[in-house]
Image (cartoon, rainbow, N blue to C red):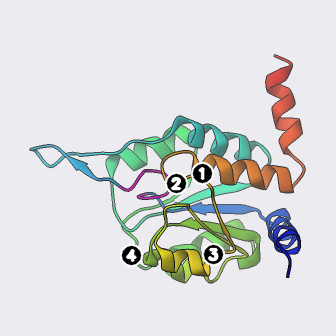
Amino acid sequence: MTDNQSRQAIVEKARKLKLLILDVDGVLTDGKLFFDNDGNEYKSFHAQDGHGIKMLRQTGVEVAIISGRKSKSVALRMKNLGIEHVYQGHENKVAAFNEIIALIGITPDQAAHVGDDVIDLPVMRRVGLAIAVNDANFVVKQYADWCTTLPGGMGAVREVCDFIMQAQGNFDGILTAYLTR
């Protein structure tokens, strides 16, 4: 298969998507964990990722979070972005995945998952489009259909959102709203 054929196959998978599932640490963040002396945890989220999520949701694609860890800052950020399907503290991500697709009423091939570490592999192997961030573990990259050019926490999620919107033919329409304001 040529690079062009491979790219076209990925675009075809993206056209079917109705759900984007994101890991948090290493995907929506750079994977670093910060704790103060009182045990409070801090995370840094990229604003462009958040806006990409908002634009993608405007096209009718749902966004969900499945994270192995629990964090108040994640709950707050996802509430701010309007993401309803937030599953934290789920090391068995497959159970959360099955629950989400049942709630939304879609098939696994209508979902994409963005991951960075081996805990993401069970879901990545079940979805229609498996995506790894640029700085993902090498094994995760081996199982990904596509790898972003940007690292986790540094705009990789925005890259994914833009790609899905472009594949589905929605990007120009979303962009027009910003150009005509």
Q: Secondary structure at mark 4?
A: loop
The residue shown at (45%, 57%) is: 24
The front one of 130 and 64 is 130
Q: Quick check: can you spot residue 60?
A: no
Mark 1 / mark 3, whichever is N-terminal:
3
Q: Residues within 10 Å of mark 2 (few under 14, many from 20)?
A: many
Q: Residues within 10 Å of mark 3 (few under 14, many from 20)?
A: many
Vertical relation: 88 (above or below) 84: below
Three-letter code for the amino acid on which mark 4 is drawn: Glu
Closest to the camera, between mark 1 and mark 2, is: 2
Three-letter code for the amino acid on which mark 3 is drawn: Ala
Cβ–Cβ under 8 Å for marks 1 and 2: no
Mark 1 / mark 2, whichever is N-terminal:
2
The residue shown at (86%, 77%) is: 2
The residue that disc 4 covers is 91
In the image, residue 136 lies in the stretch drawn in magenta: no
In the image, residue 26 lies in the stretch drawn in magenta: yes
Q: Secondary structure at mark 2?
A: loop
Mark 4 / mark 3, whichever is N-terminal:
4
The residue that disc 1 covers is 157
Mark 4 / mark 1, whichever is N-terminal:
4
The residue that disc 3 covers is 144
Looking at the figure, which quarter contains the C terminus?
A: top right
Which residues lie in the magenta part?
Answer: 25-31
Cβ–Cβ under 8 Å for marks 1 and 3: no
Q: Secondary structure at mark 1?
A: helix
The residue shown at (50%, 54%) is: 152
The residue that disc 2 covers is 151
Separation of marks 4 and 2 at Cα, in angstroms = 22 Å
